[in-house]
Structures are given as structure tokens and as C-alpha cells.
Amino acid sequence: MDRDQLIAIIKGRLGLSDEEFDRIQSQPKYQRLFDHALEASNYRLVAEVVDSIGCHSGHHVGQKIWFDSTGNLLTKEAPSRVCAFLMPNLTVLINAFFENLMNGRDPNEVIFNRTGCFDVGVACGGWGRVVVEMKAVKVQKD
């Protein structure tokens, strides 16, 4: 696949009119995105549970939640239950990794790559706590 084919796929997925897409395509920041998106597609983002106490959703240490490089949850590879209270904080991390990928940087340069659910844990008046660590993993393509 080349850059033009990728742009055509993105345009199709967005479902925008030619005029709307032309506005996107004319912006330098999106040109950067188009320049790096093919390489970025070789990555997946994985949030691995590194600490879990009292999680109602059953997240446990070692469990992995996989996303594609653009932040889509890979549901066929996800646990049967993914806590909604964990997702907003994961979104912040996914955005940081996505920004690095779309700017042609090493996605794993994210320094603060850990986050957790909104529950503060028993010690602080909650009932559980989950902490995940995110990283980008290069995948083999067939």
C-alpha cells in the first residue's frame, strides 16, 4: 500500500464530502499524519494490568487490553469485561502514543505511561484499584 491508497482508505472511513476532505488534506499537520500513518499501522498499543486490588470487572495482573495504532479497542483480543472507569484514563495515554506515531517519533517515548481507573482504592475510601502500563508493540504483518 502506498500513501495515496492510505489517504483513499482514510477518506472512505471518514465518509466526508470531497470539499470537507480537501480542507483536511490541505493542512500541514495532516500531511504529517499521512506521511507517518503507514509506519504507525505496524504498531499495536497494549495496556497491561500491573496492579489490581478489588476490581469489580475482574481485571488482574498480567491481563492485556489491546488497541490498534489509532486507538480502536481490539474487541476480539479484549477481556470479556473492560471497565468503563478505566477507559477515560487510557484514552489520554492512547492519545500520547498516537501523537508520537503520527509525528514519526518512537511511540514508546511516552514517559508517564501508567494510569489507572477512577476508583481510589480502599485506603482512600473506594473499593478497588487497577493500574495499567501502556506500550507500543511492533507487529508482524503477513
Image (cartoon, rainbow, N blue to C red):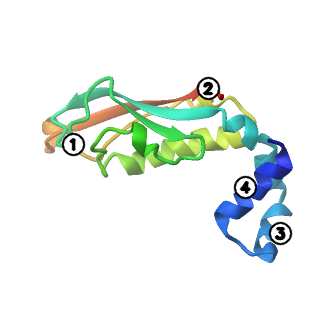
Measured from the top left, where is residue 137 in percent x and y? Answer: 57, 26
Q: CA distance from mark 3 to mark 1?
A: 44 Å
Mark 3 is surrounded, within 10 Å at the Cα level, by few (under 14), some (14 to 19) or many (20 or more) other residues, namely: few
Measured from the top left, where is residue 18 in percent x and y? Answer: 80, 73
Picture disc at residue 138: 2
The image quarter in which residue 68 lies: top right
Does residue 21 appear left or right of residue 77 in this picture? right
Q: CA distance from mark 3 to mark 4?
A: 14 Å
> Mark 3 near mark 4, Cβ–Cβ under 8 Å?
no
**Marked residue nearer the N-terminal end (2 or 3):** 3
Measured from the top left, where is residue 73 in percent x and y? Answer: 46, 46
Mark 1 is surrounded, within 10 Å at the Cα level, by few (under 14), some (14 to 19) or many (20 or more) other residues, namely: some
**Marked residue nearer the N-terminal end (2 or 4):** 4
Give the amino acid at mark 1.
Ser
> Mark 2 near mark 4, Cβ–Cβ under 8 Å?
no
Residue drawn where x is 62% and y is 28% of the image: 109
Residue 29 visible here? no
Vertical arrangement, residue 62 with respect to residue 46, above or below: above
Secondary structure under the numbered disc 4 in the rendered image: helix
Picture disc at residue 57: 1
**Marked residue nearer the N-terminal end (3 or 1):** 3
**Marked residue nearer the N-terminal end (1 or 4):** 4
Quickly name the residue at label 3: 22
Secondary structure under the numbered disc 3 in the rendered image: helix
Q: Quadrant of the N terminus?
A: top right
Picture disc at residue 9: 4
**Marked residue nearer the N-terminal end (3 or 4):** 4
Secondary structure under the numbered disc 1 in the rendered image: loop
Residue 33 visible here? yes
Residue drawn where x is 54% and y is 46% of the image: 71
Name the mark nearer the viewer: 2 or 4: 4
Give the amino acid at mark 3.
Asp
